[in-house]
Image (spheres, coloured by chain):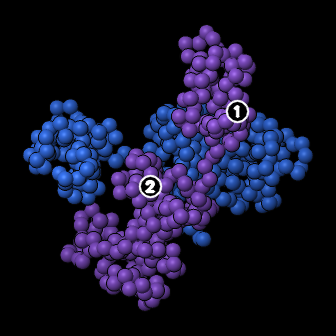
Chain colours: A blue, B purple
Amino acid sequence: MKIDRHSTQPLYAQLKELIIDRISQQDYEPGQRIPSEMELCQELSLSRPTVRQAVAELVSEGILVIVKGKGTYVADDPERIEIDNVTAQRFSLLSAKSLAEFSNPTVETIPSEQTIDRLFALTETGHHPGYWGITWQQEESGACYATCQSLIPVTMFPDLGPDLRQGKRLIDILANKYAYLPQKTTGRILVRQARIDESKALDISRNAPVLVLTGIMTARSGHVCEINTTVMRADLVSLNIGSGRS
Amino acid sequence: MKIDRHSTQPLYAQLKELIIDRISQQDYEPGQRIPSEMELCQELSLSRPTVRQAVAELVSEGILVIVKGKGTYVADDPERIEIDNVTAQRFSLLSAKSLAEFSNPTVETIPSEQTIDRLFALTETGHHPGYWGITWQQEESGACYATCQSLIPVTMFPDLGPDLRQGKRLIDILANKYAYLPQKTTGRILVRQARIDESKALDISRNAPVLVLTGIMTARSGHVCEINTTVMRADLVSLNIGSGRS
């Protein structure tokens, strides 16, 4: 791409595109220094204010970074926390092998409520004692990258709340519960803006994008036994998925 | 949550949080009308300008919507295009059953280049004729929701470019190429800001978040035969994933 002096597009805007072009063609690579303002002026026969405006906007867009006393650099691609084997039950409590990674889960009782009952297909059963709502965080090197919540019907696991609070082992909690353990699961991944409680838990600004993985676990009995919602910092994670059977 | 007149937090900011709270607790549901400014003033003993500022900011943040002559509504959750059976090879060209959904693919030759050669483990083989770069779009009801690119080594499929341009059927293109067809695949999902060419192709603003699925396909021969990068509009899609074997 070249600077076109006869174009209706302002020169600084053309220069912005040219720099982005060079970054995407890896003429300028992430973490590398780009030519100085002076060098860009000379190479492209542009005025200093034009170059300055283009660079300033790219800095404010996070594409370039100014390192004081050193120059202007292409922003590094952020390092990602790699989440391996991402499937619908990746963060399921009932599918976990142990509670080792569930540091400080909080347990509350969530009353029976139409919207949730519909997801669990519990609308026809009349009054029931509601759900265990278990919430925990996922951390990596001290950074909280995900907040997880699982809903599990109290009728299936009447003692789950007290058991978790007492620190019982998962293997004991799930013993003799085979009919209620996840057998078939479906999952859904989408991106949306963080809600206020999520932005606080994940230490991100409101409206920042989050990656949401919802897993619906169905038991051998045919009933939904757990719905897990994991909200991840979109800027921090990368999800590894395998080749599925379709 | 209640409005606290002794808090250092401005009243309008408290009201914003209160409204968001009510939305997340589904007292106010998506698509429903919320009480009028007047009603909020009365219920919470707040002044008109306070209520107006809170509502105005929530409108500008896309949380509320004003429908002229009708009132203020909770914004609807956007409808999503559901992408089924998302796996590492979901958008792979060599894994496709036919070219029916590859409307207007463009084919170009991409010369051998260190960064790409490294991904294909083709650094040791010396000079080679580069890659076919095939680009196409995914559409649903007229909206382009994804732009896909596959890179395929020319050495493995010397005639792929001309074959695609001539409209040859995929089944004929891939005949007798079993050693070079995907057998093992790995995939990676992440969210990042759209690049300039992507924002144009997807008709979104620069810096809007995109969901990127990268699939690396390895052939029976042990060589990487295709790398597919699919860039999706994060606001439009939801990906359905199954229960994987881990």
Which quadrant is home to the C terminus of chain A?
bottom right
Compared with B96, B25 (above or below) is above
With B43 as the anchor, is B102 left or right in this view? left
Q: Nearer the viewer, residue A225 or A22?
A: A22
* Residue at (48, 58) in percent of width and height: B232
Res. B182 in view? no
Report the amino acid beneath label 2.
Answer: Asp
* Residue at (14, 38) in percent of width and height: A48
Res. A36 in view? yes
Q: Nearer the viewer, residue A179 or B226?
A: B226
Q: Position of residue A219 (x, y in %)?
A: 76, 57
Which quadrant is home to the N terminus of chain A?
bottom left
Q: Which residue is mark 1?
A: B34
Of all chains, the one bearing label 2 is: B
Q: Position of residue A188 (x, y in %)?
A: 61, 55
Packing grade of label 2 (10 A; few <14, some 14-19, many >=20) is few
Q: Position of residue B202 (x, y in %)?
A: 44, 57
Residue ranking furthest to the left? A42
Report the amino acid beneath label 1.
Answer: Ile
Q: Which residue is mark 2?
A: B203
With A214 as the anchor, is A64 left or right in this view? left
Residue ranking furthest to the front? B69
* Residue at (34, 40) in percent of width and height: A61
* Residue at (72, 29) in percent of width and height: B35
Residue ranking furthest to the top? B6
Q: Nearer the viewer, residue B229 or A10?
A: A10
Query: Which quadrant would residue B40 be assigned to in this image?
Result: top right
Compared with A207, B38 (above or below) is above
